[in-house]
Amino acid sequence: MKKLYSMLVATIVGGVLMSSADAVRAAEGTFKVSEFTFATPEGWKKEQPKSSMRKAQLSAPGKDGAKDAEVTFFYFGPSSGGGVQANVSRWFGQFKDRKNEKAEEKTVGGVKVTYVTTDGTFMSGPPFGGPKTPVPNSSLLGAIVEGKNGSVFVKMTGPSATVKGSDAGFRGMIEGALK
């Protein structure tokens, strides 16, 4: 009887009915930043944040020999971290010879998200001063999630092929946390 019961146990995660084993695996791949719980996209890896300013960090895998992209999560509390436009401008400013700049707003589950994209030469290095290393053929895909407790800033940078190939996983991760 006990075995039958454990086989019948199911859990609803993100609106999807899952077996208890699948639910445990899903929970292990989740992490919280402010009031949002994000699920790590399949094939992506959680990493130790490289800075105390980062609340979480992931690696999105490159395909066909391309390097991985870095995905970072920042949260500075209510009314902190600067406004949406200031961050969009700062993110664009981290690229030289940039093209295809785009910032678009979307509302998901009552939460406003601003997606940011651009391509060019990423000037890798500390965001506020310090030496920068030019990384050509790079792209940015960012999201500013305006939560009740302050904004969460999520930024993916890396080789253009990797970032563009990870677009659906990135947006799914962001929007899944808002539903």
Image: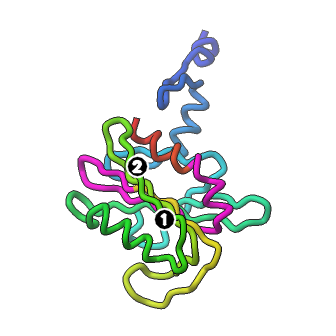
Which disc, if any, is residue 42?
Answer: none
Picture coordinates of residue 85 (x, y %)? 31, 64
Residue 142 seen in render: yes
Q: Compared to 102, does 17 lie above or below?
A: above
Picture coordinates of residue 116 (x, y %)? 45, 59
Which residue occupies the foreground of this view, 155 or 120? Answer: 120
Instruction: Let me know if residue 160 is in the magenta part.
Output: yes
Type of amino acid at the residue the image marks with label 2: Lys
Residue that carries the numbered disc 1 in the rendered image: 101
- Secondary structure at badge 2 equals strand
Residue that carries the numbered disc 2 in the rendered image: 32
Residue 57 seen in render: no
- Secondary structure at badge 1 equals strand
Which residue occupies the foreground of this view, 86 or 7? Answer: 86
Picture coordinates of residue 175 (x, y %)? 45, 42
* Residue 101 placement, left or right of 106: right
Which residue occupies the foreground of this view, 148 or 101? Answer: 101
Q: Compared to 179, does 35 lie above or below?
A: below
Q: Which residues are magenta?
A: 144-169
Quarter of the picture holding the N terminus: top right
- Is disc 2 surrounded by few (<14), some (14 to 19) or many (20+) residues within 10 Å? few
Observer-side mark, 2 or 1, equals 1
Residue depicted at x 24% and y 64%: 80
- Is disc 1 surrounded by few (<14), some (14 to 19) or many (20+) residues within 10 Å? few
